[in-house]
Amino acid sequence: MPSLLPSRYYPEPHDPHGLDPQPPVRPSGPIGILVVNLGTPDEPSAPAIRRYLAQFLSDPRVIEIPQWIWRIILHGIILRTRPRTLVPRYRGIWLEQGSPLVVYSQAQATGLEKALQMEGADVRVMLAMRYGNPSIEAGIDALRKKGCERILTVPLYPQYAASTTATVVDAVTAYTARLRNQPELRFIKRYQDDPGYIQALVSKLTAFWNVHGKPERLLLSFHGLPQRTILQGDPYHRDCMDTVRAIKAHLPQEDAERVYVSFQSRFGAEKWLQPYTEPTLKAWAQEGIKHIDVMCPGFLADCLETLEEIQEECREAFLHAGGETFRYIPCLNDDAQWVEALSQIVRRHLSGWSEKA
Ligand SMILES: C=CC1=C(C)c2cc3[nH]c(cc4nc(cc5[nH]c(cc1n2)c(C)c5CCC(=O)O)C(CCC(=O)O)=C4C)c(C)c3C=C
Ligand SMILES: [Fe+2]
Ligand SMILES: [Fe+2]
């Protein structure tokens, strides 16, 4: 008998012959948690970087100019030149187990599953990357195979942006739109001023200062966005400022007064959020500021943008302009206090789905 559904709806995995028995209802099955970060190349080689950039930079949520013009620039120029220049930069940060972004995001996903299960919650956690591997499709499939009929997506971005958070929602719903037996979906939007997240950052800062002493200034550097996107209603800048305000509120007055904010990783010719990180550091050195710390609260996992752009390039720029001490304070990565805070954030979003959560 011909199916009433278009063939683009996949047959269910347990029904390889397409006989379509009703899938068993498992209302008390485990809850799936899909932890999602941006993505990174599979290896530090030009072909792998090209594959990753091609997927990332073809996302209309990331590059918002007419796609036919952009495709010419992307395939004609960027994908021919940028991968080769990125090879040594990725090689310089690569860990034995892989790209730091995946290694630390995986540590957070594993720690989250452990923390939630220790409290008796029936959850399964999978890590996925919006671009590259492990893919969102593979993550959802793995959760469904574990019997999850409810999936909470947790973007590893504390501050909401259309180019990061919204595109994760797009990708999850685009995939489930092709499924016959859809899971029930929830999404976390933001946690930019969550007390556990802020406390984990502040503990990291104060622990560092207790050992190494305080700097003259601390720069909180966030990933930038085109200014236009804020004027069009993206709440990202406000979210970053919420984070900065919350961090300062947890510090003694004399430390809060040393805290400044900037935006890094500008890409393309448009004006991005300002002040820009590297010019800020150069200006400070020229003003006579000698000893500074930099932290990147918007990145939960160290990656190319922190380990290379901040820890290498920005250090070089600051020291070259006359600065003397540049200390980079790492991201939360596998920090136990952060993993516990993340589990609390997740638990709050499971209300009504799990009595034990
Ligand atoms: C217009 C382009 C870009 C926007 C908008 C953008 C927003 C954005 N990105 C992150 C987090 C990360 N970005 C990373 C790398 C990266 N970002 C862009 C471009 C835009 N980002 C590019 C082209 C790259 C690749 C490297 C390069 O070519 O310079 C990464 C690190 C990936 C890694 O492999 O380590 C992260 C993480 C956020 C949070 C954000 C908006 C708020
Ligand atoms: Fe980026
Ligand atoms: Fe960069």
Image (tube, rainbow, N blue to C red):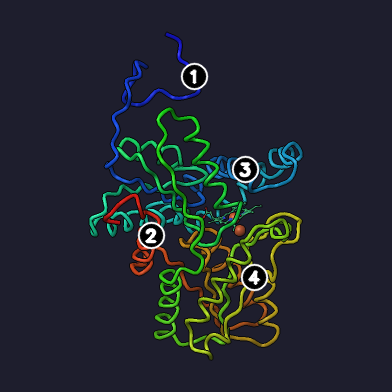
Residue that mark 3 sits on: 59
Residue that mark 4 sits on: 277
> Between marks 1 and 3, how big is the CA–CA gap?
26 Å
> Residue 92 — which label?
none
Q: Earlier in the sequence, mark 1 or mark 2?
A: 1
| Between marks 4 and 3 in the image, the one whose residue lies nearer the viewer | 3
> Between marks 3 and 2, how big is the CA–CA gap?
31 Å
Label 3: which secondary element: loop
Q: Residue at x 40, y 86 (%)?
A: 210
Q: Earlier in the sequence, mark 4 or mark 2?
A: 4
Residue that mark 1 sits on: 7
Where residue 352 appears, as percent x and y from the top left, is 35, 52
> Residue 348 — which label?
2
Where residue 197 appears, as percent x and y from the top left, is 43, 68
Give the amino acid at mark 2. Arg
Name the side, left or right, on which 274 lies relative to 115: right
Q: Residue at x 47, y 56 (%)?
A: 156
Give the amino acid at mark 3. Asp
Where residue 66 appears, as percent x and y from the top left, is 75, 41
Name the side, left or right, on which 77 lies relative to 164: right
Name the side, left or right, on which 136 lies relative to 275: left
Q: Quadrant of the C terminus?
A: bottom left
State ligand 1's quadrant: bottom right
